[in-house]
Amino acid sequence: MDSGKSTLALQTAHNHKSRGRTGLIFTSKDRAGAGVISSRLGLQSEAIEVEASLDIHKFVVEHLSMGDRIDYIICDEAQFYQPEQIEGLAKIVDGAPTAPVDGASVLRVMTLGVKCGDEVLVTVEGESEEETSAKLQEIVESNDH
């Protein structure tokens, strides 16, 4: 307490914005009220209020899936977040999705954050599942990197 964490969060957001980056600022129970991050110095900015029911991971994935650009995420007052919300943030950082993604949407697949060497479980369902599964296997096996 009284160590300037909110001021630092606001400075960090300002630095990112001044470089043309877009991001999200989350907060909970800020002194200035809901949906605001503020410092004792009088600085403040809009923020997303983290209510107990907010699924942060789902929120971020949905925004990415809609084509929103998120270069950074700043979390203030995280001591008030629910354990599940902290786990959701960890999954964002680690790039691990919690829900299946429709492979028919290239954008949704791209937002998974899969890196070279990661293991991915693919489930194919539908009318042409055998043909699609065989084609996917061929693509994966023919890719050297």
Image (tube, rainbow, N blue to C red):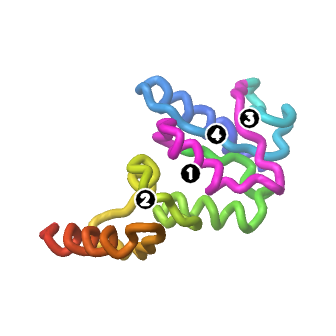
Residue on which disc 3 sits: 37
Numbered range of the magenta stretch: 43-72
Task: Please name the amino acid that badge 3 sits on.
Answer: Ile
Nearer the observer: mark 3 or 1; the answer is: 1
Name which of mark 4 and mark 1 comes first in the sequence: 4
Establish if 140 lies above or below 67. below
Position of residue 27 measured from the top left corner of the image (x, y, whole percent): 73, 44
Q: Secondary structure at mark 3?
A: strand
Is 60 displayed left or right of 51 in the figure?
left
Residue on which disc 4 sits: 25
Name which of mark 4 and mark 2 comes first in the sequence: 4
Residue 59 in the magenta stretch? The answer is: yes
- Is 121 or 90 nearer to us in this picture? 121
Name which of mark 2 and mark 3 comes first in the sequence: 3
Marks 2 and 3 sit apart, C-alpha to C-alpha, by 37 Å
Name which of mark 2 and mark 1 comes first in the sequence: 1
Task: Please name the amino acid that badge 1 sits on.
Answer: Val
Nearer the observer: mark 4 or 1; the answer is: 1
Contact between labelled residues 1 and 3, with CB atoms less than 8 Å apart: no
- Is 100 or 133 nearer to us in this picture? 133
- Which residue is found at the position 79% from the left and 46% from the top? 28
Residue on which disc 2 sits: 103
Residue on which disc 1 sits: 61
Instruction: Classify mark 1: residues with Cα within 10 Å, few (<14), some (14-19) or many (20+).
Output: some
- Which residue is found at the position 82% from the left and 50% from the top? 51
